[in-house]
Image (spheres, rainbow, N blue to C red):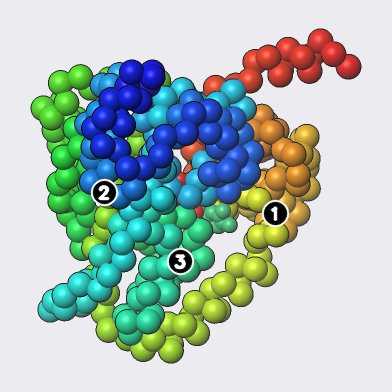
Amino acid sequence: MNMAEMDKLAAAGLRGEVRLREPMARHTSWRAGGSAERALLPADLDDLALTLRVLAPHEPVLVVGLGSNLLVRDGGLRGTVILTHWALRELRRGSATADGTDLYAQAGVPSPRVARFAAMNDLKGAEFLAGIPGTVGGALAMNAGCYGGETWDIVASVETIYRSGTIRSRTRDDYEIAYRHVRLKDERGRMNLEVHENLHPSSFILASSTPLRGPHPSEEWFVSATFRLPGGSGAESRVRITELLRRRIATQPLERPNAGSVFRNPPGDYAARLIEACGLKGKAIGGARISVKHANFIVNEGGARAADIEALIVLAEQSVREQFGVVLEREVLIVGERDEGAGMKAEGQP
Ligand SMILES: Cc1cc2nc3c(=O)[nH]c(=O)nc-3n(C[C@H](O)[C@H](O)[C@H](O)COP(=O)(O)OP(=O)(O)OC[C@H]3O[C@@H](n4cnc5c(N)ncnc54)[C@H](O)[C@@H]3O)c2cc1C
């Protein structure tokens, strides 16, 4: 986006904010990494639609919730990051149906808020969301889950927004859904090509070892979910939430910045067990360390660079592959460009 495009946004009536060279360490739970060329903080859903309509068709867009599953490399991100957490904050009780009561949550609502709101309304089944420190949008994109619950188990429908700013409603049947995996069925490619003549590949560098999942980096993003939950006892849900959070505090290194589990668990095993068996628990590179408390977590001990975190990720992958023949799949998404200058400096200077 250049100055002319920013003027165009202002002239079109953008009520939100545009920030240039926005440090993504402010918007990711690892508190590390480079800057986004531009960050857009729309005021609400209408503002988001307007923004998408005005952005140049070749502008790379990354939608970010609370950045709790994201590593932005030190060289930063080209294009525009849209921060939904600032915009899409509506959460309300909907109507009762034969299979439960609906809760409407926009994509920027933190998942733990949905858990508490459901309990307040005597609805059960959303308690697991209390321990997932991202947004509803991120939970939909990742099919986030824990302790037996998964986001899409409780979704009745979602609304999405296209690059053109148009909103549409979708159901679970439109998606292929599995463990930490959500992808639009075949219709996606056809539909996007029909809707967006100027479809382009994202210029974000995706470093995941796994195939792309979720709507990212497609041209369609989640803007809301309607959860359908059976009636229950708010008091019982609150007890369950407290228990879940207690278990997390006991087993996860929550006192240091992290992004939750770095790898998906391979079938029939645990990534943490394999990493620990390679002797990597406590291994540090720069300011990052494989947690002593939970080997599938990497913590920022202060001043970690994204490169330190990524080096530990690669080390864990290589070690587990060499020792056990298991290919670990990344759960976290790595985007952006390496800071080649820093690498050269490190090599050339003592
Ligand atoms: C301490 C800790 C514990 C965690 N525990 C769990 C756990 O138990 N289970 C679990 O599943 N995860 C866990 N996580 C990981 C993370 O919280 C979840 O994956 C969460 O759902 C990500 O949400 P987010 O808003 O932070 O997404 P982000 O990190 O901002 O984005 C993640 C991905 O989702 C995409 N995305 C975000 N919003 C949208 C949108 N509106 N539309 C389309 N795509 C979007 C992004 O582009 C990106 O690809 C944990 C993380 C931490 C830090």
User: Which SS class for mark 3?
Assistant: helix
User: Which SS class for mark 2?
Assistant: helix
Within the image, what quadrant is residue 121 found in? bottom left
Q: Amino acid at mark 3?
A: Pro
Q: Earlier in the sequence, mark 3 or mark 1?
A: 3
Residue at the location (62% across, 45% down)?
Answer: 30
Q: Amino acid at mark 2?
A: Leu
Please identify the quadrant where the N terminus is shown. top left
How far is mark 3 from mark 1, CA to CA? 19 Å
Front one among 117 and 229: 117
How far is mark 2 from mark 1, CA to CA? 33 Å
Residue at the location (42% across, 55% down)?
Answer: 135
Residue highlighted by disc 3: 112
User: Which SS class for mark 1?
Assistant: loop
Q: Position of residue 71 (x, y in %)?
A: 55, 37
Residue highlighted by disc 2: 45
**Dot 1: few (<14), some (14–19), or many (≥20) neighbours within 10 Å?**
some
Q: Position of residue 136 (x, y in %)?
A: 37, 56
Q: Earlier in the sequence, mark 3 or mark 2?
A: 2
Residue at the location (50% across, 46% down)?
Answer: 67
Q: Position of residue 228 (x, y in %)?
A: 24, 70
The label on residue 256 is 1
**Dot 3: few (<14), some (14–19), or many (≥20) neighbours within 10 Å?**
many
**Dot 2: few (<14), some (14–19), or many (≥20) neighbours within 10 Å?**
many
Q: Position of residue 339 (x, y in %)?
A: 63, 20
Q: Is residue 303 among the parts visible in the rendering?
A: yes
